[in-house]
Image (spheres, rainbow, N blue to C red):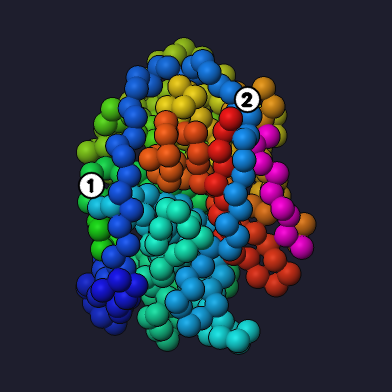
């Protein structure tokens, strides 16, 4: 039924946390073309002309058919079985400005690529004693602390999923408990979100996949920020076959200074700038990696710092893509590019969807914009 949502089916102990939650997703079909997959070693390539021809701002991303006013931040997307699924971070629901419920992660489906601001929420109609059922289930260890102000578990999603087959994708997210940050994975298998297999990166290493990722010829490249020693200025990368993405023993790690890959995971005790594949003079915060057929190049579209409010692209003569209309609170954050949109408009990468967290007077919500290059 188009536009319908259903109560999640929680598998496991009904009185406790679940390892798996299933949703009846709205039937909005948005087919995409297979992403171009040239040799990874093309980067950086020629034709890197980043002059912006036009920018169409679609405004707030929302579900017009939902009885609640929904505000949220963060977010990432991917296309699974011809549905474009979005995961968001903190999500709050209001009825005529009266607070009703919240969750730290929610799930929506894109209604139409031509109107990217239109979403259909799959998790917001299920009210539980602690608010909405979160789109990503808690584990046994996390469940007792789900509402503790000092030790509350949160899962921040600021990057896109990695599609591993037509019906499955992997999502890396930052898991926060007090001041400890980890990176882990869950699988979105059409209608099901699971956390049965996880890859954990402690804060003393690099959280591969939590900054950006892309798949080239069946290999997933997972990008991580060095937040401990470089202040998020250095980007490091690991690679693994998509079929083995939850097997940490199959990961290889790149050292740019020697141009070699190794199965030995770095255990940094200081900044390793020469080993990084990218190093910026100001901090990165969120980013997206993808191949642009139009530019014949791999692009990194990113934000600098959390109070940035400007989309930028690497290797441009002028790195500024689009300076956002800043919200009343002075800045926006969480910018992510979504290359699966507009692949049918011509060569992929000529037009891309940008989304970011816009800070209004009292609320934060995602906004969408279509950027087209000359």
Report x, y in % for residue 352. 50, 41
Q: Residue furthest top?
A: 258
The magenta segment: 320-328
Query: What label does residue 316 carry, if any?
Result: 2
Nearer the observer, 182 or 8: 8
State yes or no: discs 1 and 2 in contact (Cβ < 8 Å).
no
Q: Dot 2 surroundings within 10 Å: few (below 14), some, or many (20 or more)?
A: some
Nearer the observer, 345 or 176: 345
Q: Looking at the figure, which quarter contains the C terminus?
A: top right
Query: Helix, strand or loop at disc 2?
Result: loop
Residue at 55% x, 77% y is 69
- According to the picture, the residue beneath numbered tag 1 turns out to be 166
Report x, y in % for residue 215. 34, 34
The answer to if 325 sits in the magenta stretch is yes
For residue 373, which quarter of the picture?
top right
Query: What label does residue 322 carry, if any?
Result: none
């Amino acid at each position: 039924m188009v536009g319908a949502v259903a109560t999640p089916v929680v598998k496991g102990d009904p009185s406790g946390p679940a390892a798996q939650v299933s949703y009846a997703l709205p039937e909005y079909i948005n087919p995409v073309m297979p992403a171009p997959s040239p040799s990874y070693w093309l980067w950086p390539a020629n034709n890197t002309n980043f002059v912006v021809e036009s920018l169409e701002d679609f405004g707030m991303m929302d579900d017009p058919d939902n009885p609640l006013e929904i505000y949220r931040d963060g977010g990432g997307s991917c296309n699974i079985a011809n549905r474009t699924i979005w995961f968001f971070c903190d999500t709050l629901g209001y009825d005529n400005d009266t607070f009703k419920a919240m969750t730290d992660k929610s799930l929506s489906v894109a209604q139409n690529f031509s109107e990217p601001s239109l979403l259909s929420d799959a998790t917001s109609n299920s009210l539980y004693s602690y608010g909405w059922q979160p789109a990503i289930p808690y584990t046994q260890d996390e469940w007792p602390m789900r509402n503790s102000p000092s030790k509350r578990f949160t899962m921040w999603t600021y990057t896109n999923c990695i599609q591993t087959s037509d019906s499955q994708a992997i999502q890396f997210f930052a898991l926060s408990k007090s001041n400890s940050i980890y990176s882990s994975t869950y699988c979105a298998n059409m209608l099901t979100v699971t956390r049965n297999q996880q890859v954990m990166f402690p804060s003393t290493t690099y959280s591969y996949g939590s900054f950006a990722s892309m798949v080239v010829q069946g290999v997933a490249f997972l990008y991580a920020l060095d937040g401990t020693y470089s202040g998020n200025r250095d980007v490091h990368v690991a690679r693994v076959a998509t079929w083995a993405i939850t097997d940490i023993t199959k990961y290889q790690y790149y050292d740019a200074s020697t141009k070699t890959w190794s199965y030995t995971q770095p255990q940094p005790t200081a900044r390793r700038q020469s080993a990084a594949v990218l190093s910026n003079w100001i901090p990165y915060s969120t980013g997206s990696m993808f191949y642009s057929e139009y530019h014949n190049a791999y692009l990194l579209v990113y934000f600098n710092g959390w109070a940035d409010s400007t989309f930028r692209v690497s290797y441009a003569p002028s790195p500024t893509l689009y300076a956002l209309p800043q919200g009343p609170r002075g800045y926006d954050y969480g910018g992510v590019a979504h290359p699966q949109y507009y692949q049918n408009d011509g060569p992929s990468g000529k037009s891309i969807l940008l989304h970011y967290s816009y800070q209004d007077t009292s609320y934060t919500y995602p906004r969408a914009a279509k950027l087209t290059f000359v």
